Image (cartoon, rainbow, N blue to C red):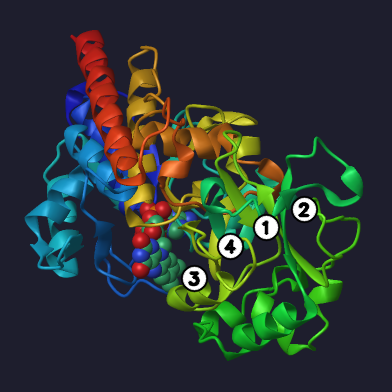
Amino acid sequence: MSAGAGIPVHVIGGGLAGCEAAWQLARAGVGVRLHEMRPRRPTEAHVSDRLAELVCSNSFRSDDAENNAVGLLHEEMRRAGSLIMAAADAHKVPAGGALAVDREGFAAAVQRALEAEPLVEIERGEVAGAPPEDWDSVIVATGPLTSPALSEAILALTGEESLAFFDAIAPIVYKDSVDLSVAWFQSRYDKGDGRDYINCPLSKAQYEAFIAALLAGETTAFKAWEMETPYFEGCLPIEVMAERGPETLRFGPMKPVGLSNAHGGEKPHAVVQLRQDNALGTLYNMVGFQTKLKHGEQTRVFRLIPGLEKAEFARLGGVHRNTFINSPRLLDPELRLRADPRLRFAGQITGVEGYVESAAIGLLAGRFAACERHRAPAAPPPPTTALGALLGHITGGAASETFQPMNVNFGLFPPLEGRIGKRERRRAYTRRALADLDGWLGAGRAAAE
Ligand SMILES: Cc1cc2nc3c(=O)[nH]c(=O)nc-3n(C[C@H](O)[C@H](O)[C@H](O)COP(=O)(O)OP(=O)(O)OC[C@H]3O[C@@H](n4cnc5c(N)ncnc54)[C@H](O)[C@@H]3O)c2cc1C
């Protein structure tokens, strides 16, 4: 490491988030020690010793920066000098409107860039417990398969209810796409402020048809090593509950009790409740509807529910082995653990979902840690940008009681003023985002000079 590097920031985990964080720190002139446990200690999903290995698909999803939230995130990261995006662009393979990469070439390019960077020292070995006390600035970016020894240490810092080893993701619907001439706002027994839940009623015939469709839906299987992880009854996929008997859901998440029908119709035989999912009130999750149904099947089956015939999904459901903390409760706006601010978290472990989102949070963690080293204020990106919207969601915008991993989507952005058509609305979001991002990056550059 070069003489000017100073005391290094320790980045634990050389995946998508850790590599991006290390790169951003080095670009800002800060020394880094990047700790990656592979190949000494493998994970259940990685197959190589490469940094930034993609564990499954080779897709970074849509690259449409004008109309798509993840495409916008790509563009924002490019403008912020992202190593992950530069390597992805250099190794892209044809995939229509998506950005897909040659995984070997991509990972090799990330590794080469970090190995060539004099401010980065790569250390192969597991951090098998709490980071040593003399590491004064640490970024934990160990991902969904964080090693058990480090997970134990995080558990001790955060408490059992704040670290999850499985996600149980219920589909999330844009509120604007729910038909409120069928569904209505009401909490069971009229508790709360009356806007917390939206209720979708089913008659007996509709309920039976829904259960039949659910049971016939094609699912994704758990991997053998996922089955070996302790698994909680509370996270059972909805189709597994339905397999236990046709009435199970009616006595579980679809129970019709404590509700009247605000539209004056007959008392529902069963109800699907949607609960407000973010402070902006733009997103609602389907309560208790975590599922292993394939994505196409979810859209088809869940649109059978009255009120959701035209539902647009901000994210679809899933149940996976994962490791993530309750970020809205635990982290401050600069991704520092409130209980021990020398530790920052980045990547999938913060409760974002996906390669791009994980790298994006790595980018921010790296920049924040660099500002701290330079004793400069770290302005977070504006909430109107994809980077800012994602950061705002995990550090406070999401409801902490029901926090589950999230990918970037326009429901996380502050709403636009006035009535704008759907297609034009996306362009208005992305135009506003890129203008605000350029202002933020410009202010950061000016402060550094
Ligand atoms: C089976 C599986 C399939 C997935 N498929 C997809 C997909 O198709 N598309 C998608 O977008 N996302 C997918 N994901 C999610 C994916 O893991 C994340 O999107 C992304 O890899 C997260 O980046 P990260 O940097 O947070 O974690 P990772 O990329 O996993 O990087 C974490 C790194 O930390 C290292 N590490 C762990 N513990 C320690 C320790 N104690 N000391 C030192 N090093 C440590 C690991 O070896 C790893 O290299 C999948 C996840 C899993 C588990």
x then y, percent, for residue 380: 40, 23
Q: Which residue is mark 1?
A: 182
Q: Which mark is residue 308?
A: 4
**Does residue 32 appear anywhere in the picture?**
no
Residue type beneath disc 3: Thr
Q: Earlier in the sequence, mark 2 or mark 3?
A: 2
Residue type beneath disc 4: Leu
**How busy is the neighbourhood of tag 4: few (under 14 within 10 Å), some, or many (20 plus)?**
many
Q: Earlier in the sequence, mark 4 or mark 1?
A: 1
CB atoms of marks 3 and 1 within 8 Å: no
x then y, percent, for residue 178: 58, 53
- Between circles 4 and 2, the one closer to the viewer is 2
Q: Earlier in the sequence, mark 3 or mark 1?
A: 1
**How busy is the neighbourhood of tag 2: few (under 14 within 10 Å), some, or many (20 plus)?**
few
The quadrant of the rendering that contains the N terminus is top left
**How busy is the neighbourhood of tag 1: few (under 14 within 10 Å), some, or many (20 plus)?**
some
Q: Which mark is residue 47?
A: none
Q: Which residue is mark 3?
A: 299
